Amino acid sequence: MDNGSAGQAEEGGAWAGPAGAEAFAAVEAATDWLLGYPFVFEALSRRLGADELLVDYGCGPGRVADRAARVLGARVVGVDTSAEMLAIARSTATAVAEFHLVRDGRVTGLPDECADAVMCNHVPASLPTEEALLGVFAEIRRLLRPGAPFVLLTTDPDCTELEYTSLRVGAPGVSYRLGEEMPLRLLRTDGSWQEVRNHAWPVDRLPILLESARFREVSQRRPTVDEASALADPALVGRHPWTAERAAPPLVITSALAS
Ligand SMILES: C[S@@+](CC[C@H](N)C(=O)[O-])C[C@H]1O[C@@H](n2cnc3c(N)ncnc32)[C@H](O)[C@@H]1O
């Protein structure tokens, strides 16, 4: 197994810099495409009209933003702290309308209350403190018009025991405290594994933080393989046995409305 780690030091956490962007762009994310992203899109589709503005906060290389634009028919804007991620996204995510850099915690070029919805997938894991996470939630709240939906996808740091199809969370038997550094291994498209040091965000803490950041009607769900059979790409559903995903689904979707 290749345990090469992406760089950590700069703003943006584990995936910062050119090496981080290249590393994340090579990740396969089968478990996320089964139990995560389709459910994010489903939650958004209930409240987002065609041609309305959806911001993908921490869009990375833009794959998910691109799929969202195609599935939802929304006008999708990707934002990220990493200029390198945005460069990859600009060249590959052709259905995305615009990309903006996040600088000093603020999205450049997007006014207050411009967004009809925001999704944020796997960004908290890059953030080491509650203060940093609250800063991200405050910026997302600034972008959203009142009443608009926010959908957040995270990995449960308690799912350390099982070998997921494209994911290994932490070390078996270890319990991680809020914000604590935690290793994560992700399957790459070439079959090797990428290790990064992420931060643990216990899922039951997220609603409390969202409410303190002026969100309301916070709810959470943990999608199952049975539910995914009706929602995810049928070719993907049939490709793997999903043994660990059936035993303990590792992804949690937290939804809220801007107050
Ligand atoms: C694990 S990647 C996820 C990318 C994409 N959301 C996905 O699910 O494929 C995390 C992304 O969040 C970005 N990021 C980290 N901290 C951020 C912050 N404070 N504001 C915006 N983006 C951030 C990183 O640069 C990286 O592109």
Image (spheres, helix red, strand yellow):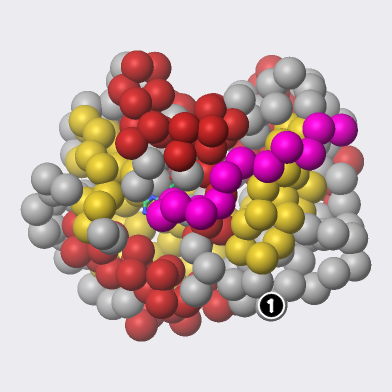
Q: Does the residue labelled 1 lie within 8 Å of ligand 1?
A: no
Q: Quadrant of the N terminus?
A: top right
Which residue does the image show at 66% across and 54% down from the upper left? 197
Residue labelled with disc 1: 177
The structure residue drawn at horizontal position 52% and vertical position 43%, both measured from the top left corner, is: 15
Camera-side residue: 239 or 120? Answer: 120
Residue segment shown in magenta: 1-13
What residue type is disc 1 on?
Arg
Q: In this view, does 14 lie to the left or right of 29?
A: left
Q: Is the magenta stretch mostly helix, strand or loop?
A: loop
Magenta segment includes 188: no
Seen from the viewer's position, the closer of residues 196 and 244 is 196
Determine if the magenta segment contains residue 10.
yes
Q: Residue at x 11, y 59 (%)?
A: 112
Judged left or right of residue 33, residue 127 is: left
Tell me residue 7's x, y (percent): 57, 45
Could you say which quadrant of the image residue 176 lies in?
bottom right
The residue tagged with tag 1: helix, strand or loop? Answer: loop
Return the x and y of residue 8 as percentages of the image width and height. Answer: 55, 51
Report the quarter where the C terminus lies.
bottom left
Please indicate, yes or no, whether residue 144 appears anywhere in the rendered image.
no
Residue 137 picture quarter: bottom left
